[in-house]
């Protein structure tokens, strides 16, 4: 007898809008609320944690907003703001820190191969940009196909988060 598990999970804000297409990084210029709307009140997603995932000294929970500005072709300056004061600033360069693909900023994509009791391949992709309404948008998606404990498994899912654009 062969059993198979196939499942998918897709989450996002209640009025989730699709990605808009970024043609010029200046379209991202603006100030965005740090706390995102994932459609799940239990899941706290902070834009600062996406931008600076390795910075454990940054007080992510106290950051109110993230300011994004294109300062030169292909170069973004990003500021973390707490009560209007810059507490962290970084510069990100296209081709070094991110790629622009299909009108979105691609932060990560790639394959991995789990081990132990699982045999197969997993794919992960992380994109950021603006939605069709001009709000900030983040999507993490992934898929896995393989065998877990001798059971064929196929999983796929994505999670969208909206970051409100407070002003340009």
Image (cartoon, rainbow, N blue to C red):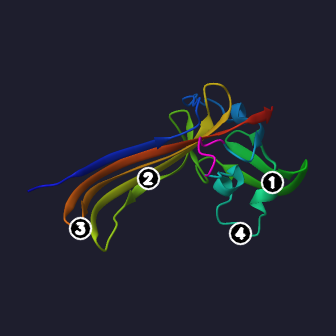
User: Where 78 falls versus 19 (above or below)?
Assistant: below
Separation of residues labelled 3 and 1 (CA atoms): 43 Å
Residue lying at the far bottom in this picture: please name it: 116
User: Where 129 falls versus 126 (above or below)?
Assistant: above
Residue drawn 8% across the image and 56% down it: 1
Label 3 sits on residue: 149
Label 4 sits on residue: 56
Residue 55, image x, y percentages:
70, 66
Residue drawn 44% across the image and 52% down it: 124
Query: Reading the chain from its start, which is encountered first: label 1 or label 4?
Result: 4
Point out the stretch of residues depicted in magenta: 37-42
Query: Reading the chain from its start, which is encountered first: label 2 or label 4?
Result: 4
**Helix or strand or loop: what does disc 1 sit on?**
loop
Residue lying at the far front in this picture: please name it: 42
Query: Reading the chain from its start, which is encountered first: label 3 or label 1?
Result: 1
Separation of residues labelled 1 and 4 (CA atoms): 13 Å
Left or right? Give the position of 152 relative to 110: left
Separation of residues labelled 2 and 4 (CA atoms): 23 Å
Magenta stretch, main secondary structure, is loop
Separation of residues labelled 4 and 3 (CA atoms): 36 Å
Residue 66, image x, y percentages:
77, 46
- 45 or 40: nearer the eye? 40
Residue 140 visible in this rendered orientation of the protein: yes
């Amino acid at each position: 007898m062969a059993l198979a598990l196939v499942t998918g999970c897709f989450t996002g804000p209640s009025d989730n809008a699709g990605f808009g297409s970024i043609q010029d990084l200046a379209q991202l210029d603006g100030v965005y609320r740090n706390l995102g709307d994932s459609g799940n009140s239990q899941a706290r997603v902070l834009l600062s944690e996406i931008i600076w995932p390795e910075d454990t000294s940054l007080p992510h929970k106290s950051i109110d907003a993230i300011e994004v500005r294109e300062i030169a072709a292909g170069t973004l300056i990003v500021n973390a703001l707490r009560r209007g004061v810059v507490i962290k600033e970084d510069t990100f360069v296209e081709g070094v820190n991110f790629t622009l693909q299909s009108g979105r900023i691609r932060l990560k994509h790639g394959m991995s191969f789990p081990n132990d009791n699982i045999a197969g391949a997993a794919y992960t992709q992380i994109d950021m940009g603006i939605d069709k309404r001009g709000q900030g948008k983040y999507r993490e998606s992934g898929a896995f196909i393989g065998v877990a404990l001798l059971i064929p498994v196929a999983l796929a899912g994505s999670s969208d988060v909206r970051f409100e654009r407070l002003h340009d």
